[in-house]
Image (cartoon, rainbow, N blue to C red):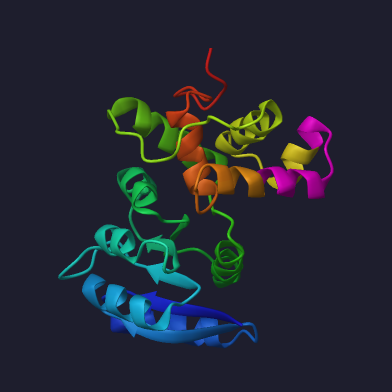
Amino acid sequence: MIRVLVADDQALLRGSFRVLVDSEPDLMVVGEAGTGAEAVSIAMEERPDVVLMDVRMPEMDGIEATRRIGTASRVLIVTMFDLDAYVYDALRAGASGFLLKDTPPADLLAAVRVVARGEALLAPTVTRRLIEEFARIPVTPTIRGLDGVTEREREVLTLIARGLSNAEISAHLQLSSATVKTHISRLLAKLDARDRAQLVIAAYEGGLVSPAGGPSP
């Protein structure tokens, strides 16, 4: 059972998310929060698998709430605003993905399951935005360096940073799906990264990808 916390300052929207999530046999809402502070408090107490997090909330916004939740739960940002304004800060804070509030219900449910599995919900366009933002704003590295990462793992990491799925990485490198998953698991462990979103950050900070999203020269 995937346990979900819904954080949004609009009661009607929270109720709609609850009904939608609870309608699925493998999903269950374990709490609702109307402020970022409430989201942090409930997340610390309930330890949900996934937090559906609004960005603009009173007392504390969703970005700061995501930062404070840390590794307690995986956070899926659900916003009505354009991703460009938030992708950088939210991913740096630890978010595992983004959805817009006009996303079809079936896609939202699928996204919860993806994030609960430990995968990041990052389309190639969002990945490119993240890399471009890193290039624009000087950053202090937050992920471990690439010492100890093998050449093959670097190849996998580069493809992750380009937004490729496991299946696409498998085809590109002519590796089995199981082998790709093994490489990704090792990367997560070696880089002390929680999910794909942080692997993208590691690839940029390690110089494997350029601002255009491709390999560095």
Q: Quadrant of residue 77?
A: bottom left
Q: Residue at left 43%, top 77%?
A: 47
Q: Quadrant of residue 57?
A: bottom left
Q: Is residue 48 above or below residue 138?
A: below
- Determine whether, in the image, residue 76 is placed left or right of residue 186: left
- Camera-side residue of 63 and 193: 193
- Camera-side residue of 167 and 201: 201
Q: Is residue 13 above or below residue 62?
A: below
Main SS of residues in magenta: helix
- Camera-side residue of 162 and 184: 184
Q: Is residue 155 above or below residue 51?
A: above
Residue bounds of the magenta highlight: 171-184
- Camera-side residue of 156 and 9: 156
Residue 153 in view in this figure: yes
Residue 111 location in percent, x, y?
Answer: 56, 64
Give the residue at the far left of this rendering: 59
Q: Residue at left 31%, top 27%?
A: 136
Give the residue at the far front of this rendering: 148
- Determine whether, in the image, residue 52 is placed left or right of residue 111: left
